[in-house]
Image (spheres, rainbow, N blue to C red):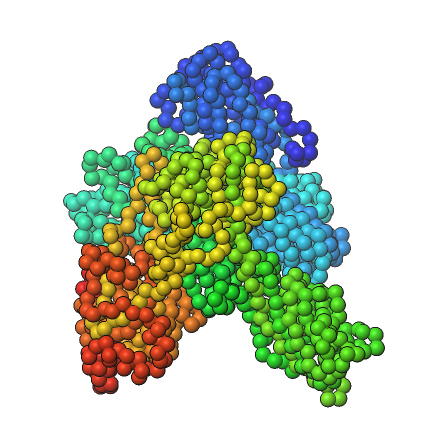
Amino acid sequence: MCASHYSCDGSLASFLPATSFQSSSHFSDSRAAYFAKLNKIDGGGGWSPESTDRSPWLQVDLQDRMEVTAVATQGRHGSTDWVSAYMLLYSDTGRVWKQYMLEDNVGRLVGNVNPDSVVHHKLSQSIRTRFLRFVPLEWSPSGRVGLRVAVYGCAYRSYVADFDGRSSLLYRFNQKSMSTVKDVISLRFKSRQAEGVLLHGEGQRGDYITLELHRGRLALHLNLGELHSFRMVVTLGSLLDDLHWHSVLIERFNKQVNFTLDRHTQHFRTKGDGDSLEVDYELSFGGIPLPGKPGTFIRRNFHGCMENLYYNGVNVIDLAKRRKPQIYSVGNVTFSCSEPQLVAATFQSSSSSFLLLPAPAPILEDLSVRLQFRTWNPDGLLLSSPLISGQEPCYLILQISSGRLHLTHQTSALKMSEVSAGQRVNDGLWHSVSLNTRGLQIIMILDSEPASTIQLKNYLQPKDKHYFGGCPVSQNDSSCLNPTMAFQGCVRLIRVNNQLVDLLSVQQGRLGSYNQLQFDLCGIRDRCLYNFCEHGSQCSQTWSSFSCDCTGTGYSGATCHNSVYEASCEHYRLAGSTSGYFFIDPDGSGPLDPIQVYCNITGNKVWTVVRHNSSIAVKVRGSTLQKPYVGWFNYSASSEQLKALVSLSDRCEQRIAYHCRRSRLFNPWDGTPLSWWVDRRGEKRTYWGGFQPGVQQCSCGLEENCADMNYFCNCDADRNDSGILSYKEHLPVREIVIGDTYRLGSEAMYVVGPLQCSDDKKEYFLWNAVSFYQAASYLQFPALQVELSLDVSFYFKTASPSGVFLENMGIQDFIRVELSSPSAVTFSFNAGDGPVVLTVKSPVPLNDRQWHWVRAERNVKEACLQVDQLPLRIIETPPDGHLRLQLGSQLFVGGTATRQRGFFGCIREFNMNGVNFDLEERAKVTPGVSSGCAGHCSSSARLCHNRGKCIEKSSGYMCDCTNSAYGGPSCTEEVSMSFERGASVTYIFQEPFSVIQNRSAAVLSIPSQYSKTRDNMALSFQTTQSPAMLLTVNTLSQQYVAIILARNGSLQIWYQLNKDKRPDVFSPIFSSLADGRLHRVHIQREGKDIFVQVLFFKKYTLSYDVAFNSMKSLTLGKVTEVAHAGSKGFIGCFSSVQYNHVAPLKAALLNRGSSLVSIRGHLLESNCGALADLSTSVSRLGKFLEMKTNEVGKDNEHREDNSQPDSAVIGGLFYHLSLLHCFICNSQ
């Protein structure tokens, strides 16, 4: 029975005998464990350990397995002793403990703040156990540990079966087969192994159900009636071979299945044609026996215990225990759970954990060490043993290195022998390793792999001790050598010279010594089990943390939460892009993936175009209503993505044309549709133009200009129809169905254009602004789901010294973003571990009546705050802290629920987790708030372009083009230069970008214009010269990125992020770009992902992910140190060059003589666009450049010499890695 169905809150500890209370130690007899009952005031008024006890604990034996639902704590009566935080462990046997975890995998329980008040803690999930152990973590600052406890719950009844790995139970049906449409299977298990079958049944028609452990995970295989279907496997859990109980519930109705392990449920639909599960003869539990061969099994059997095993209401273990005929027992199944006495030790610290054990005398003269370990860390020391080899000291070192197990015999720093085994021993599973010396050999065996052997020159003589896991930090002698970090993980079954080490004696101080170890507990956790990495990114982990690989997802950040793409084509237009293919992400950090679209940008008008797979005209013949022709349209976006795009657009349309010959759209007698199309919801539509979905007409009928006024469609009169579908709720067209081309001479031909949506509505949200003019005013919105990930961004403008931008308060948790002083913005929150505050301070006032941008983010890995282009502030979240923000149901914008510290000023473009908030609409019904914001820079007039910033002036405005590659009053004038032979511009980065640490917390400050794993570069160029060097960026650590034109004029992009490996080379355009035309190149890097936009959008992936370090310089044109053709550099025109927030051409024009800009050769301020308009031919551009310089003609003559080999030109030069490496080295 489950505690949730009846009262289960009785006191379990009040009447326990004194022997049920034990402790690691006690301060005095009056403070012994027995005095630790809640509200007990006799004796010393509670339990206190010895002051020298390194790992104090108080243990309660409930005498039998009970269902525990709550615990309570008190301090020691009449004292200053109490426990303010503790860890709760539980066990069936008093050995092999497990830590109780809260919902967020937090194992720290809040205790007391004084000696006599009672703090109750109701367990979120009840636990069935006999032993409880309270482990103090923090205690009274003015006293010591003092504790009294109570335990609440009820009796627990269970039916237990023990399987020894060679046994099973068979539940046999009364008939040949059992067919069910509904199944409920429940059980609890504890396993000694990572592999084993718990349940299996199968039928002749292909049905089967199998529940098994595989690599410590629980896998459910289920199929209904499909003999050749792809095998469907659903997995839950991890590390399930932990010798602790786990609950399983399988509920099936027809194809719908709920699969629950412990407190986590996965819902899915089964494969197959049927709705029923048909199983022949029997279900087996604990193994899959071979028919006709009792005791022989197909897969590894389950080794462990099961309890309360129910199949559709049948108590299988109870029937087996009572020897009922429905149950057949194979092998030795017993009805009490045998408990292995496996004592594990957890090495907690990767820097200071170690276990020092004396070496017992070997039974023989040889050395022997065996142990089992499990970890997530790819590196760590397992064993360091000092030895003597031929009168000289040496070491035997066993370590994990890059996920492999390495054994090293080291006699000096330069002399060593090494063997390795395994491929990924840091997979969290238990692994066994044994070392033996036999004569002049050291033999290592990992799991069941073949032995690895080191040959010796001299016999080894062991010393008197062995170090496991690490070396003492303050060691003065040389008896321990650790070439790597300390081991962080679990170890058990340590045997030295065939003698099992008693780890409990180590804990009690009777054997060896240790540091940073937990005993009788394996504290491993799978931090990737419930993946907090978003948008399909891959999770990897170490012992204490996890990381997310965002490669290929289109997202970035610690949890891959932030989209690397703009939200719409309108955003690309505002950033200065022209028409082309782009990825857009309409819901930003929301759940939908990015969409590849074509952005048709014409002046200030933007259309988003989504294409499909059938853009050409399709002819149809021979179709009838009974067997109609059906054409499907597959778009470059899913239904959910299309729905989001359409809903965020002001207007959408799709052109459709129907050319017909004796092919009607409607029956002329009764109007029955003979052809139709299907909308995005799968519904049939019979209108063929316009935005009126209720009419059965074509465009000519709506416009009253059909060829025959007796019909509403031209096709009904053997003419052609075309129209534009513009009712956006029905778009796009998913199918077209044609049913009248069966008559003699009948034929139809249709064309369905792409989906096109205007971005006018997105522009509305870009400039959606409100003004707050009363201190007590605010806008109130329903809160979004932001438990695990929150990002919010907005612009503000104010003259006030302070004010709250937004707030959401829970019972304890909260989030708040505010202007805390005239020059500081603060982001504060509490997720359960106490308030966290991030502040960005500006060197200039922020209440200057100008627009400022704010973005705050909090996820399970970190929190960050950015204001304008000021340094980004980051703080890491505690690795074992609370994960979920428990907030209220209302979000307040521009103020607080208490109506205090309200904001005076304007807020616009408010976005949270990819959702645009309509501030203006809410302001219409809110007193103290008005729609819009006064000022020239507060509208969608597009006063400043290409990343230019609008600055309010007393009598107008100005555009700050500092962060734009363009110039002029509106940041629209291209900044161009004509480069002659040998010319170059080199921009020197001011200093290597640094990371600054806040002393009060782990807060990082990173210049927002530069991320070590992110590049954003764009340039326009015009040339007839190839090969040519366009742009290079290099670092002090010999990393670089280079953009070049190869000998044939094709574009190449080189990334060298690791000087020890070959560079990555991408060729997005194979045709020649040295054609005298103006070309625009845009390159964006996010980690390993490279996005290139030239004529088309393309995506590439780097072969390795390494950050740019210590930026040095950016060069346009000639790099003087490169010989041969590389010295030609670039001859032509550069325009609007930008690298992140650096505009090198502008810097060259505005900062001549500055130490930041180095100019070589002859450069002329020019206009590439005007040059391109003169002529698109190579010859005319050559004549124009010849007017600028006499050297160009010589260069042209040189290019006409075809005898020059490819290795002499820059394209060939770059294909030779050594020469390119020299180029980068010399350029520094």
For residue 708, side relative to residue 1189 (left or right): right
The structure residue drawn at horizontal position 46% and vertical position 36%, both measured from the top left corner, is 803
Quarter-wise, where is residue 151 in the image? top right
Residue 548 % position (x, y): 43, 51
Residue 1162 % position (x, y): 20, 70
Q: Is residue 340 among the parts visible in the rendering?
A: no
Asked if 877 appears above or below 1008 in the picture, the reply is: above
Q: Is residue 38 among the parts visible in the rendering?
A: yes
Quarter-wise, where is residue 506 in the image? top left
Q: Which part of the image, by quadrant, shows the C terminus?
A: bottom left
For residue 314, side relative to residue 811 (left or right): right
For residue 763, side relative to residue 210 (left or right): left
Frontmost residue, 1124 versus 339: 1124
The structure residue drawn at horizontal position 45% and vertical position 27%, both measured from the top left corner, is 85
Asked if 745 appears above or below 378 in the picture, the reply is: below
Residue 499 % position (x, y): 36, 38
